[in-house]
Image (tube, rainbow, N blue to C red):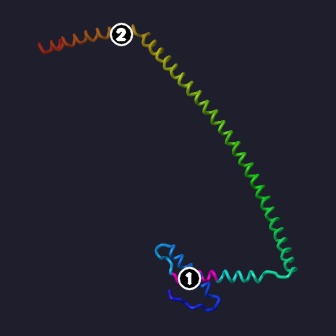
Amino acid sequence: MAETKPEKNGEALPRLAASSLARLVLLSTPFGIFREDLLADVIFQLIKRGATSLAQLRGALKTTPEEIQEDYSRRVEMAADHLLKAGSLLSSLRTDLERQSQELANVQANIDKHKQDVEYWKKLADINKESAQVLTVELESALRRQIRQELDRGKNLRRVASAIGWIITLILGGIVGAMIQQYWQTGSIF
């Protein structure tokens, strides 16, 4: 970095501080992101701006007791205005928070009501499920008994019909067999 001579006598110390801070920043940052001379100029401008603000603030200070009293009175009035505004804001915030609290209480009551409804319907569904299982078992049992009775009711009739059908099948089978044998032997059926 090329050393620049201070333009004024009062700039030597701020320039030295800016340069020292710039080197400290460069040592603490990785990869040499900043250029030292540019960083020193930026820091010097910040120091200069801060010093100017401090000088203006110092010049604004009152020195006479009347000016000090007037300044205190003005500050008290400003503080009272700020307190009134803060009180108004707090009041509106309190009102808003109370309204939101009431809304949350209503939502909570609604949630509790729905929760009770869900529990009621769940219990009812469980009861209906148990009843349905018992009813299903009972219906299956009754249906089996009724089918068994229907099967048993016509059992003898079906046995007789089956025997008659079997006998007719045997007789017809014998007749057809005899006709086929007759046809093979004589060439005619009758």
Query: How many numbered circles are shown?
Result: 2
- The quadrant where residue 60 appears: bottom right
Q: Residue at x 72, y 46 (%)?
A: 105
Image x and y of residue 43, in percent: 59, 80
Image x and y of residue 74, in percent: 84, 74
Residue carrying label 2? 161
Q: Quadrant of the C terminus?
A: top left
The answer to whether residue 130 is left or right of residue 150 is: right
Magenta span of residues: 36-47
- The quadrant where residue 53 appears: bottom right
Q: Residue at x 50, y 21 (%)?
A: 137
Labelled disc at residue 179: none
Name the magenta segment's main secondary structure.
Answer: helix
Instruction: Residue 153: say if magenta.
Output: no
Image x and y of residue 114, in percent: 66, 39
Residue carrying label 1? 19
Q: Nearer the viewer, residue 27 or 146?
A: 27
- The quadrant where residue 50 appears: bottom right
Q: Nearer the viewer, residue 101 or 117?
A: 101
Q: Residues within 10 Å of mark 2 (few under 14, many from 20)?
A: few
Q: Residue furthest left?
A: 185
In the rendered structure, which amino acid carries the disc numbered 1? Ser
In the rendered structure, which amino acid carries the disc numbered 2? Ala
Q: Please tell me which of labels 1 and 2 falls first in the chain.
A: 1
Image x and y of residue 85, in percent: 80, 65
Give the alpha-carbon distance from disc 1 to disc 2, as whole Å: 123 Å
Q: Residue at x 64, y 83 (%)?
A: 48
Q: Callout 2: helix, strand or loop? A: helix
